[in-house]
Image (cartoon, rainbow, N blue to C red):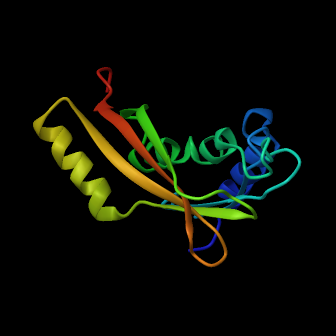
Amino acid sequence: MSESLRTRLMRWGFNLWPCYRGTGGRVAYIAADWQEVRVRLPLSWRTRNYVGTIFGGSLYGAVNPFFMIMLMENLGAGFTVWDKAAAIRFRKPGRGTLTATFKLDEPELKEIRRLLLEQPKVDRTYTVLLVDGNGAIHAEIEKTIHISINKSS
């Protein structure tokens, strides 16, 4: 699926927003339906750590907000969506540009809605990988997202 004008503007906004820009990450693509986002994280003077590899804070910061925002965009205003927990596992030093691809699908969104009919809140855990051009995994980030139905809805 291609980007829409709205998601293209959101991509540009992310890449200009000082909070996100400071991570060194760049949003490369946001699907029109917000079910896929791609991020690039180059090794540069802004992301380089003391030993010459990508700084761990940049690795995490570049991927931090996306599962939460993707869920908010797909579920809509009737839901509260918050980051609840995160874990990062560094597998190998980043010595070049790394990429991450975030994906959500309709069965997952339907399952969340189904679970929220049975219980007031649900936590879902998602994993994203930062990989190099050869597909080697450099970092694995696990995000736990809290989702509930807005009480005012």
Which residue is at 14% across, 33% downward? 119
Q: Is there any visible trace of residue 32 in the rendered image?
A: no
Counting from the top left corner in percent of width and height, residue 91 is at 53, 57
Residue 95 image-quadrant placement: bottom right
Which residue is at 27% across, 63% downward? 107
The single residue placed furthest to the left in the displayed view is: 118
Counting from the top left corner in percent of width and height, residue 22 is at 79, 38
**In screen coordinates, is 10 left or right of 153?**
right
Counting from the top left corner in percent of width and height, residue 141 is at 48, 49
Residue 99 image-quadrant placement: bottom right
Q: Quadrant of the N terminus?
A: bottom right
The single residue placed furthest to the front in the displayed view is: 51
Counting from the top left corner in percent of width and height, residue 49 is at 78, 43
In the depicted structure, whether residue 17 falls above or below residue 38: above
The single residue placed furthest to the bottom in the displayed view is: 134
Q: How many discs mark residues in the rendered view? A: 0
In the depicted structure, whether residue 48 falls above or below residue 94: above
Which residue is at 29% across, 21% downward? 151
Residue nearest the viewer, comparing 105 with 153? 105
Residue nearest the viewer, comparing 133 with 70? 133
**In screen coordinates, is 148 left or right of 52?**
left
Q: Quadrant of the C terminus?
A: top left
In the depicted structure, whether residue 62 falls above or below residue 138: above
Which residue is at 68% across, 58% downward? 94
**In screen coordinates, is 4 left or right of 135?**
right
